[in-house]
Image (tube, rainbow, N blue to C red):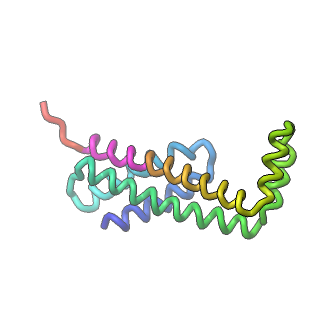
Amino acid sequence: MALRTALFIACLITGLEIFPPLLLIAPLFGGLAAVILFQKRTGRLLTTGAAAKLGWMTAVINTVLGTVAITVTAVMDGLGPLREAMRQQATSPSQQQALQMMNDPYVMAAAVFMSWLFVFALISGLCIAGGALGARLAKPRTL
C-alpha cells in the first residue's frame, strides 16, 4: 500500500514540477500528501520515522520519473537549444572558458551527474520533511 501511495503522489508532483513556482513547494506537499493519503487508506497512524521513509520513497520515484522526462525531452530536442542559450549568456572570459570545457563529453557527463545528485538531494530532503510534517500533524493532540 505504501508503494502505491508513493507512486501515485510522485506522479502528481512530477506533473506539478513543470511549473517553476511549484518546483520547491511540490515535493514538500508531496511528502505531506503521501502520509495523509496512506493514513486515510489504511486507517493507521505513522510514526515520524515511518512517514519520513514514505516521503523518501515518494522522492525516489519522483526523481526517476523526472529523470526519464528530462532524458526524453533532451533526446527529442537535442542539446542544441541548451548550448545556444548558454552561448548567448556567456559574456565574461571565464564563462567562455567554461563553455569550451562543456564540449568535452567527460566534463559534460560529470556536470550532469553532479546536477542530478543535487536535485535528488533537494527533492529527497523536501519530501522527507513533508512526510515527517504529515506525521506530526496527524497525531492526536492531548491536553
On screen, 91 above or below 83? Answer: above
Residue 101 coordinates in the image, percent (x, y): 78, 53
Residue 134 coordinates in the image, percent (x, y): 32, 45
Residue 9 coordinates in the image, percent (x, y): 44, 59
Residue 132 located within the stretch drawn in magenta: yes
| Position of residue 80 in the picture relative to residue 132 (left or right) | right
On screen, 47 above or below 77? Answer: above
The residue located at (72%, 64%) in the rendering is 74
Q: Which residues are magenta?
A: 127-138
The N terminus - image quarter: bottom left
The C terminus - image quarter: top left
The residue most toward the left is 143
| Position of residue 18 in the picture relative to residue 5 (left or right) | right
Q: Quadrant of residue 102?
A: bottom right
Is residue 78 at least partly visible in the picture?
A: yes
Is residue 36 at least partly visible in the picture?
A: no
